């Protein structure tokens, strides 16, 4: 007999995961090279060589009782200090190691910070489209998820509606830039306007509203676009970072939270978040990979490989008559479905062995997400299949 809170999950198990399983099934029938699986954000670029070398060196040279042992629940002090210094160099911030808590990826980091700040019944605002797991994370702490509807022109946050949705119960706002699923990067003007609204509303309601910056895709930005560092625009910002995408380490489960000194109640928050890390069951982030991060702090994945995929897929699809906002970050493309029911469009795609995730999985029906963290060959070979799909919907090829 399972708990009431778990029952809805049985019915609505993640559509993305289900699609992944479908991909495996199709590959076993048609062969991997004939299936165009754009469903999962699993990096196709291997981790940089520095990671492999650091693992070998650490295992060969360091004391096993340290590299495989327990440490402070916030993580190894030397690693946190190294990351803080790297952030300070890159973004002109002034963090110390104590401002960082190593977490089990971004997912666990978000759970830790929500556990730290959300009381039952308090509201957490998100901007559609959004990573649907946010809803589950907020409900883990009996918070209430409040959605702001999408601005489908730009996919920048809809700030007028945001202002209206803030109440005396608003405890936090989650933003994600570069963005899953649209690939949009929030501009500095957007961030400034959002911060100004938060300042105004904190005064109006005499409350503290935290801005949670969920940024697993920070390093994946193209066309020279800047990704603003949010703690510089709004004092009550908490950053949740992950190495899942930036170093292609999603299975290693490693990331961190930054709780700056400027954030309201920072000292208690750091202590509470460290305890939350422990009592959520994570105890601490995995030890060996923390030490690896300490040695590879400025390493980067091959962003150019994703950029090449981005251009080939975006341009290929636009030429075929599809419409889509040009992504400038992450490794996703958010295609407008040629029919209102995007699930029907996803089903049609399967006939051509193309797997896409319906926008309703991100609270934005009418669109589909393509994760282009696949091989370049997959992108190129998928285009003739997309052409057949486009013809099925009567789309007009662009004249070249
Ligand atoms: N936040 C967003 C927006 C994501 O897209 C993901 C993963 O895809 C996560 C959080 C979770 O990342 P992690 O693997 O670091 O837990």
Image (cartoon, grey):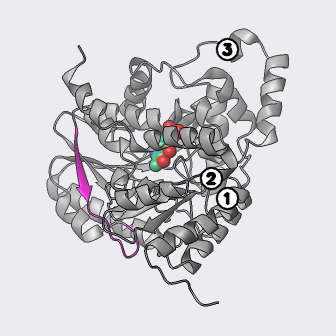
13 displayed left or right of 56: left
Mark 3 residue element: loop
Q: Residues within 10 Å of mark 2 (few under 14, many from 20)?
A: many
In reply to whether residue 152 is colored magenta, the answer given is: yes
Say which mark, if any, is on residue 68.
3
Which residue is at 70% across, 41% downward?
Answer: 297
Q: Are marks 2 and 1 in contact (CB under 8 Å)?
A: yes
Tell me whether circle 3 and circle 1 mark residues in contact (CB < 8 Å): no
Q: What numbered label is drawn on residue 373?
A: 2
User: Which element is circle 1 on?
Assistant: helix
- Residue carrying label 1: 306
Label 2: element kind: loop
Residue positioned 44% across, 60% down in the render: 348
Residue 250 screen position, x and y as percent: 59, 37
Residue drawn at (40%, 68%) of the image: 337
Q: Quadrant of the C terminus?
A: bottom right
Closest to the observer, 12 or 36: 36
Q: Which residues are magenta?
A: 143-156
In the rendered structure, which disc, 3 or 2, sits on the residue that comes first in sequence?
A: 3
In the rendered image of this protein, does residue 322 appear above or below residue 82? below
């Amino acid at each position: 007999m399972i708990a009431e809170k778990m029952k809805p999950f049985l019915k609505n198990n993640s559509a993305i995961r289900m699609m992944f399983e479908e991909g495996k099934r199709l590959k076993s029938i048609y062969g991997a090279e004939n299936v165009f699986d754009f469903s999962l954000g699993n990096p196709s670029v291997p981790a940089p060589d520095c990671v492999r070398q650091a693992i070998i060196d650490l295992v060969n040279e360091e004391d096993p009782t340290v590299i495989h042992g327990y440490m402070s629940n916030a993580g190894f002090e030397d690693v946190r200090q190294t990351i803080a210094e790297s952030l300070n160099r890159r973004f002109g911030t002034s963090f110390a190691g104590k401002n960082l808590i190593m977490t089990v990826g971004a997912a666990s980091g978000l759970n830790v910070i929500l556990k730290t700040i959300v009381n039952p019944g308090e509201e957490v605002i998100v901007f559609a489209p959004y990573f649907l797991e946010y809803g589950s994370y907020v409900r883990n702490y009996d918070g209430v998820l409040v959605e702001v509807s999408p601005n489908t022109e730009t996919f920048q946050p809809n700030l007028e509606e945001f202002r209206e949705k803030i109440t005396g119960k608003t405890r936090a706002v989650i933003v994600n830039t570069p963005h899953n699923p649209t690939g949009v990067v929030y501009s500095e003007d957007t961030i400034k306007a959002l911060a100004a609204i938060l300042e105004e509303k904190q005064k109006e309601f005499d409350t503290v509203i935290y801005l949670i910056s969920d940024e697993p895709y920070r390093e994946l930005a193209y066309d020279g676009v800047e990704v603003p560092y949010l703690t510089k625009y709004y004092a009550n910002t908490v950053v949740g970072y992950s190495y899942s995408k930036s170093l292609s380490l999603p299975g290693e489960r490693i990331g961190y939270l930054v709780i700056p000194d400027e954030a309201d109640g920072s000292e208690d928050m750091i202590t509470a978040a460290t305890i939350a890390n422990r009592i959520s069951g994570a105890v601490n982030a995995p030890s060996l990979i923390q030490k690896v991060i300490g040695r590879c702090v400025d390493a980067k994945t091959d962003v150019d490989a994703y950029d090449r995929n981005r251009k080939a897929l975006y341009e290929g699809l636009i030429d075929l008559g599809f419409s889509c906002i040009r992504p400038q970050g992450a490794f996703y493309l958010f295609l407008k479905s040629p029919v209102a029911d995007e699930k029907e469009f996803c089903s049609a795609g399967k006939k051509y062995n193309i797997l896409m995730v319906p926008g309703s999985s991100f609270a934005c029906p009418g669109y589909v997400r393509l994760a282009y963290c696949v091989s370049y060959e997959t992108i190129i070979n998928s285009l003739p299949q997309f052409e057949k799909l486009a013809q099925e919907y009567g789309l007009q090829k662009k004249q070249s």
